[in-house]
């Protein structure tokens, strides 16, 4: 079994070897730009790791689908940034800012198409299962994004609403990445289902950590401006938990602050962060991240994996929840 570091190196080599050039340049240059600015490569890493639990022969049958998962993730980022009107992605200008919105939409569309071309390199015996899972997941990610946008116009949502939304927007793609790797590696249905549940709950922890960084991270490390979610009224774990914990007066104050015009951005961010501090939201978010991390690990109990295989997944999970960006 390869180490996580060795798997990370394989993924980077795979990403760097991608030839995404094409004409017209305005369509393909943004794709190369987005892939080149880096990222955590969580989805292809998880796909390779899950595959390697069952097979030591890492070749194109897993590398191409793993790259497809990263390309699909890139497509979602391009379109998310347009919808969020975000200026920065990993400390670099977003595609719709560097080029324009029309180019960004088309480049994202091509990335979605290319992701299917790469995924379809899965071995013939499991190709239908892999494509069915990927197609279902792709639709679910779009559903999650729509829920996310819908929630921006609502005064508040429940924590159940929030968890459903991030489960669709983030959880299912990590889950599918893990399961696709396991399926191609030859895992049984029961084992691959357990690995799917591991990835799903890890995805919840991962997204809450992202929400956490938006308010309590270092923008130089995190790669985005702090408070972006606050400015656009995004229903993050922190905001939802704040409405749940606040008394009537604080809840109204928070609601009034969120209606403040974006021109008063920094004052808006400062006031919300002060409320978060008073309600203990930073510590509560850290506990929630740890909770879903534990649920992810518990999902492996009935998987039939041996200790070495389980430890590999545990190490990967810890690396995601303990990250600094």
Image (cartoon, rainbow, N blue to C red):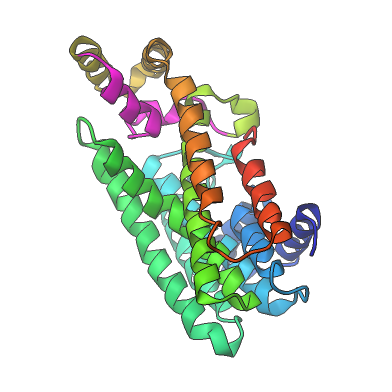
Compared to residue 207, the image places residue 131 above or below, namely below
Q: In this view, does 135 lie to the left or right of 150?
A: right
Residue 234 falls inside the magenta stretch? yes
The residue nearer to you, when weighing 248 against 218, is: 248
Q: Number of callouts in the render?
A: 0
Q: Which residue is drawn at 48% across and 37% down?
A: 291
Quick check: is 236 in the magenta stretch? yes
- Which residues, given as a range, are shown in magenta? 224-247
Question: Residue sitting at 57 percent across and 63 percent down?
Answer: 178
Q: For this view, does 289 lie left or right of residue 84?
A: right
From the viewer's side, name the closer residue of 247 and 168.
Answer: 247
Name which quarter of the figure residue 142 lies in.
bottom left
Q: In which quarter of the image is the C terminus?
A: top right
Give the vertical position of 143 relative to 149 (above or below): below
Residue 46 place in picture, x, y as percent: 63, 59
Q: Which of 22 and 281 is in front in this view?
A: 281
Give percent across and percent down for residue 168.
37, 54
Residue found 47% across the figure and 21% down from its top: 282
Q: Residue 174: horizontal and vertical position, in percent?
A: 52, 57
Q: Can residue 318 be seen in this view?
A: yes
Residue 67 location in percent, x, y? 63, 66
Q: Which residue lies furthest to the bottom in this view?
A: 124
């Amino acid at each position: 079994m390869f180490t996580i570091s060795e798997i990370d190196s394989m993924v980077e080599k795979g990403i760097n070897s991608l030839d995404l050039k094409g004409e017209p340049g305005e369509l393909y240059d943004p794709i190369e730009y987005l892939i080149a600015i880096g990222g955590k490569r969580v989805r292809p890493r998880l796909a390779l790791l899950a595959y390697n639990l069952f097979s030591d022969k890492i070749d194109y049958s897993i590398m191409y689908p793993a790259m497809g998962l990263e390309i699909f993730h890139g497509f979602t980022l391009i379109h998310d940034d347009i919808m969020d009107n975000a200026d920065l992605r990993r400390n670099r200008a977003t595609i719709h800012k560097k080029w324009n919105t029309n180019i960004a939409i088309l480049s994202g569309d091509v990335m979605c198409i290319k992701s299917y071309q790469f995924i379809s390199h899965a071995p013939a015996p499991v190709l239908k299962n892999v494509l069915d899972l990927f197609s279902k997941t792709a639709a679910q990610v779009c559903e999650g994004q729509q829920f996310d946008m819908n929630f921006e116009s609502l005064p508040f949502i429940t924590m159940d609403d929030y968890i459903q939304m991030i489960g669709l927007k983030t959880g299912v793609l990590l889950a599918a990445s893990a399961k696709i790797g396991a399926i191609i590696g030859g895992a049984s249905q029961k084992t691959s289902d357990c690995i799917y549940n591991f990835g799903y709950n890890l995805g919840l922890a991962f997204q809450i950590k992202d929400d956490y960084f938006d308010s309590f991270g270092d923008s130089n490390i995190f790669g985005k401006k702090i408070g972006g979610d606050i400015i656009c009224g995004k229903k993050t774990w922190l905001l939802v938990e704040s409405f749940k914990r606040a008394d009537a007066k604080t809840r109204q104050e928070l609601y009034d602050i969120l209606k403040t015009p974006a021109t008063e951005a920094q004052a808006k961010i400062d006031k919300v962060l002060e409320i978060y501090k008073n309600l203990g939201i930073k510590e509560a978010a850290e506990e929630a991240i740890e909770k879903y991390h534990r649920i992810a690990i518990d999902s492996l109990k009935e998987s039939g994996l041996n200790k070495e295989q389980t430890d590999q997944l545990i190490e990967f999970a810890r690396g995601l929840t303990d990250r600094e960006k």
